[in-house]
Amino acid sequence: MKLGIVGLPQSGKNTIFAALSGARGEEAVQRKSRMDQRIGTVRVADDRVDFLAALLTPKKTTYARVEYLLPSETTGGKPSRSDSALWNQIRPCDALIHVLRNFSSPGGLGATPEADFRALEEEMILSDLLVVEKRLERMELDTKRGNKPEPEELSLINACRELLEKGLPIRLDPELSSAPALRGFTFLSGRPQLIIINNEDEDESFPAWEKQPENTDIIAVRGRLEMDIAGMDPEEAGEFFTEYHIEESALDRVIERSYHLMNLISFFTVLNEEVRAWTIRSGSPALEAAGAVHTDMKKGFIRAEVLAFQHLREYGSFQEAKKAGHVRLEGKEYTVKDGDVINFRFNV
């Protein structure tokens, strides 16, 4: 899962990136020299993985991972060619983290988070509209050449244009934003979006919001404070969490909200002496989950041997859970549940 961090200048994107990427104390920040992007890769803390590792003592334990991408440029004003380069960095991301300033700027400028949100939202909508218009022009040209466009794609693109021309994001129509035929367009306004209100160190509150945007989620984070805490040792960090009434780190809250926003779940495998967590969409069938592990498993799928994590924890071992009748053999259409421990039977 890759999340792109966006926001207007001086919103604190760098601070939020540092707070997220440094929260585990891992040396996971990379810099791409070509465009000077920054990418932070962090593990998804999961006590179920910890339990499996303690129970089975595997040679390797692999947690799910989340990538945070901070693009090399900032935006402001109307989209331009340079803005297009920025948006192209963000488009491959699975979701967006929109950072909004809720503190006075160094120049004394007051905070206007809702207005700032609308400003950047308009830029993304306009950028998507340009993509739509370009595609429709190409379709029209193909039609003149005798090549009829795909009816489904044409209908979907026109539906996107109708929304965008009204100044509305594509994510307002979940079926449209998730349509497989539109996946290659990577529309910005169709991406799930988590809004981070970047507060002062002492401010735990949300700002007044006249009209909260639909199909988004919002959390308040004291970015500078959490960035400082991310660089501390666990004991010192714990003291600051207590002093500033922080129950969960910004990273854990962002991951939790991101999973919910993107409708994601985790399942687990124990294979080749490795315990590993996998992330898939909720509602995915066993066949798709098998493909996430390895293409051969999907190709030669026979059955999925499934044990719910809560039953494994209750009985303390695979053997005892199996004796109690909680290990099941499921077919390719079985809907994988969050926390399933799965052994895929396959033959290629």
Image: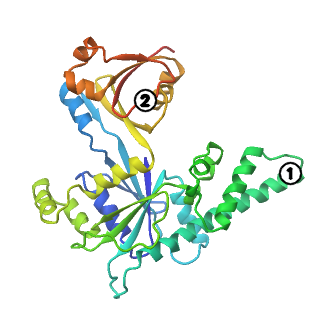
- Amino acid under label 1? Thr
Q: Position of residue 149 (x, y in %)?
A: 80, 47
Q: How is the image coloured?
A: rainbow
Question: Is residue 257 toward the left or the right of residue 284 in the image?
Answer: left
Residue at 28 percent across and 52 percent down: it is 252
Which of these two is toward me, 28 or 174?
174
Mark 1 element type? helix
Q: Which residue is mark 1?
A: 143
Q: Quadrant of residue 210?
A: bottom left
Question: Is residue 197 toward the left or the right of residue 26 in the image?
Answer: right
Residue at 39 percent across and 31 percent down: it is 337
Residue at 27 percent across and 40 percent down: it is 46
Q: Position of residue 269 (x, y in %)?
A: 34, 27
Q: Which numbered circle lies on residue 336?
A: 2
Cβ atoms at labels 1 and 2 below 8 Å apart: no
The alpha-carbon separation of the residues under discs 1 and 2 comes to 43 Å
Question: Is residue 99 toward the left or the right of residue 20 in the image?
Answer: right
Q: Is residue 275 above or below residue 208?
A: above
- Amino acid under label 2? Val
- Packing grade of label 1 (10 A; few <14, some 14-19, many >=20) is few
